[in-house]
Amino acid sequence: MSVGNMYNYFSSKEELAKFAIKYSTNILAEELREVNNMDITSKKKIYLFVKKYLENVQKSPEIVEYFLRVYLSNREVFKQGCEGFLCVGEFVTEVMILLDDGAQKKEFREQEFFPAFGMIMGCLGGFAFLSGENVLDKDLLSYSDAVAENIYRALKYDA
């Protein structure tokens, strides 16, 4: 498709950018929704989610790269119509459900959402970044269980 033809579908580069963010995060949201709907422990959900996230990074690095390098570093482009979590809301909601469900089952401790969300996404985003920079000494997916275990330990309920 030519660049000019894109304007038949999107009114501006900004609208295209917003669509790309919504599209990519909705893919992750759908995968996390599938995990959230499984009848398994919260620990297993964390392990599955981390694996699916890292598989997405490996399979479609351009999507995560776009999110990390465009969305997070060009917030001015996303001011109108993407304020707060509007463009990533479905994904954020699924993370919220994961955390709430784990806390209700006493598998995760009660904690504020934003520190827990930041810890999860900081860890996953960090590995996406390291993978994109080609500095990992092993295959990205080989880190999946260790990353998931660290996230789980940060969230788990200690009686």
Image (cartoon, rainbow, N blue to C red):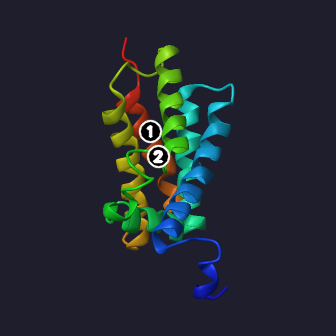
Image coordinates for residue 129, horizontal then vertical, percent: 38, 64
Asked if residue 53 can be seen in this view, the reply is yes
Query: Going from the N terminus, do you reach mark 2 or mark 1 first?
Result: 2
Query: For the residue marked with disc 1, what is the amino acid?
Result: Glu
Q: Residue at x 43, y 22 (%)?
A: 108
Image coordinates for residue 16, horizontal then vertical, percent: 53, 69
Q: Secondary structure at mark 2?
A: loop
Asked if 62 appears above or below 67 in the picture, the reply is: below
Q: Residue at x 47, y 28 (%)?
A: 99
Query: For the residue marked with disc 2, what is the amino acid?
Result: Leu
- Quarter of the image holding residue 55? bottom right
Q: Which residue is mark 2?
A: 86
Q: Nearer the viewer, residue 100 or 24?
A: 24
Say which quadrant the N terminus sits in: bottom right
Which mark, by number, is residue 102? none
Which mark, by number, is residue 149? 1
Q: Residue at x 59, y 58 (%)?
A: 23
